[in-house]
């Protein structure tokens, strides 16, 4: 269930944050980690990133609203903001697919590398 509606500026900010390969890898790692998230040390070990690089990318994801951070004693855990993730998927589905014959089943099962689209100009021969 979508708890809030996303508007274009918010969607652009989130998509911009995910438009970097390192941040996308980081985001995917946190999604897979589940509701407990991961500590900065756990993320750093799994992605083999220098601390300053990781901090830069985590900050971008937190500022976009896609990732939250919680302090537990001396540890800082990074975790997915599932409400924001669902809002972004909802925005994309409503805004970008409104006129297409796309169902949620196509979206959910269609993950993977996109098939290349070949455009042929001229005759059909």
Image: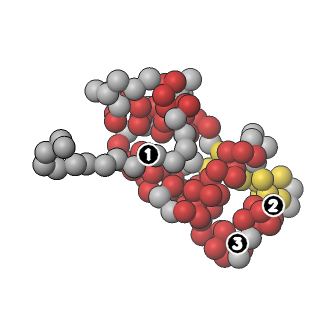
Mark positioned earlier in the residue sequence (1 or 3): 3
Residue closer to the observer: 91 or 59: 91
Q: Where is residue 48 in the image (x, y as percent from the top left)?
A: 74, 70
Q: Residue 60 appears at what percent x and percent y?
A: 55, 61
Residue 68: mark = none
Circle 1/circle 3 CB separation < 8 Å: no
Tags 2 and 3 in contact by the CB under 8 Å rule?
no
Q: Label 1: how many residues lie within 10 Å, few (<14), some (14-19) or many (20+)?
A: few
Q: Name the residue under label 1.
A: 115
Residue at 41% x, 31% y is: 93
Distance, label 2 to label 3, CA atoms, is 11 Å
Q: Residue 42 carries which label?
A: 2
Relative horizontal placement of residue 45, taking residue 51 as reference (left or right): right
Q: Is residue 71 above or below residue 36?
A: below
Tag 3 residue:
49
Residue 100, x across and y down, in percent: 32, 27
Q: 116 or 27, which is in the foreground? A: 116
Look at the picture and state if 73 lies above or below 97: below
**Marks 1 and 3, how far apart in space?**
31 Å
Q: How crowded is mark 2: few (under 14 residues within 10 Å), some or many (20 or more)?
A: few
Answer with left or right where residue 11 lies relative to residue 51. left
Q: Considering only order in the chain, which callout, 2 or 1, is on the residue closer to the N terminus?
A: 2
Q: What element carries label 1?
A: loop
């Amino acid at each position: 269930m979508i708890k809030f509606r996303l508007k274009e500026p918010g969607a652009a900010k989130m998509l911009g944050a995910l438009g970097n390969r390192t941040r996308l890898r980081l985001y995917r790692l946190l999604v897979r980690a589940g509701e407990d998230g991961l500590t900065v040390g756990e993320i750093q070990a799994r992605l083999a990133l220098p601390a300053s690089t990781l901090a830069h990318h985590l900050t971008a994801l937190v500022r976009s609203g896609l990732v939250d951070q919680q302090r537990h004693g001396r540890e800082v855990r990074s975790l997915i903001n599932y409400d924001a993730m669902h809002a972004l998927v909802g925005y994309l589905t409503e805004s970008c697919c409104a006129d297409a014959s796309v169902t949620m089943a196509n979206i959910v099962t269609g993950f993977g590398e996109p098939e290349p689209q070949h455009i042929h100009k001229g005759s059909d021969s």
